[in-house]
Amino acid sequence: MSQSDQLLRFLFRERDVRGEVVKVGASLDAMLAGHQYPQPVKQLLAELVAATSLLTATLKFEGQIAVQLQGDGPVRFVAVNGNDHQQFRGVARLQSEIQGESFAELIGQGYMLVTITPNQGERYQGIIPLVSDSLTATLEAYFNQSEQLPTRLYLYTEIGEQQSQAAGLLLQVLPVDQEKSREDFAHIEVLADTLTREELLTLPPEESLYRLFHQEIVELFPSQPVQFVCGCSRDKSASAIVSLGADVIDEYIAEGKLDISCEYCNTIYHFDAADLQQLKQKF
């Protein structure tokens, strides 16, 4: 795994502001490999990967998170699933030919659905209408609605023929003295607005933070690797076949085979008639 695939949390010691910075390269390539997504869709998925990583890091829990965009545009569905180990997978589904490249042109009218599933505790869902023409503005609206904490998000991508990368920076007010924290946030936001796309994409996260905030006292926490992990397996595919029921399995036995393709990584699992007969014995 590339050294660039990492998330770094940080805290301003004299300001009531926290932050995270993420860079994703090799793991993003692994997720996109095998898919023939148009360039704008790859860019949207890359942004959503970086955003989901940052969103996951703001949550103090062990469990899963799913961030979905659904709309009536050419891209009817795009989703990234992540967990507290910073493992992710993502997929996009198209329903018509791509005509434009902007967020609104890709998704159209719709909403963002964030589903948080802790290993222990209650599941939470938040729904945000897609009223702006950017993923960053939509996510900032989500933070303001769900956590009611001022949050600023910066997302950049670079999609190449062979290699792609995405990077993101998140700043958020700490839930303490509101007046002081908002003043601190405004000050840090002014500094962060000088960040360039090239700096966030090309520099190590520590160097990006130093360039932005060298006049502040910034405490860095240990970095966390970010990885593409699909999670599919032959056993899971076999369980899915069993769930179809004996009658359906008989139909595929008559056809002589059943192939199951994973929509996340495009791995194809082949089951011949003998395999299917063995699975039928589970009933």
Image (cartoon, rainbow, N blue to C red):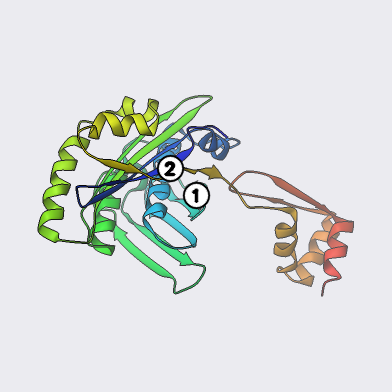
Image coordinates of residue 79 in percent, x first then y, are 46, 51
- Closer-to-camera residue (50/106): 50
Residue type at mark 2: give it: Leu
- Closer-to-camera residue (105/82): 82
Judge from the rendering whether residue 177 lies leftward or rightward of residue 114; answer left or right. Answer: left
Is residue 71 visible in the rendered image? The answer is no
Q: How many residues crowd around disc 2 within 10 Å: few (fewer than 14), some, or many (20 or more)?
A: many
Q: How many residues crowd around disc 1 within 10 Å: few (fewer than 14), some, or many (20 or more)?
A: many
- In the rendering, which numbered label is found on residue 140? none
Farthest residue in the right direction? 274
Judge from the rendering whether residue 257 lies leftward or rightward of residue 61; answer left or right. Answer: right
Q: Please state, as top left, top right, bottom left or bottom right, where the C terminus lies in the image.
A: bottom right
Labelled pair 1, 2 in contact (Cβ < 8 Å): yes
Quarter of image, res 170: top left
Instruction: Give the residue pinned by disc 1.
Output: 86
Helix, strand or loop at label 1? It is loop
Give the residue drawn at x 33%, y 56%: 110
Residue type at mark 1: give it: Gln
Image coordinates of residue 145 in percent, x first then y, are 24, 62
Give the residue drawn at x 82%, y 66%: 250
Image coordinates of residue 218 in percent, x first then y, are 28, 41
Is residue 215 visible in the rendered image? The answer is yes
Residue 149 sits above or below residue 248 on the image: above
Give the residue drawn at x 70%, y 63%: 240
Image coordinates of residue 230 in percent, x first then y, are 60, 49
Disc with the residue nearer the chain's start (1 vs 2): 2
Disc 1/disc 2 C-alpha distance (Å): 8 Å
Instruction: Give the residue pinned by disc 2.
Output: 7
Q: Please state, as top left, top right, bottom left or bottom right, where the N terminus lies in the image.
A: top right
- Closer-to-camera residue (138/185): 185
Helix, strand or loop at label 2? It is strand
- Closer-to-camera residue (276/226): 226
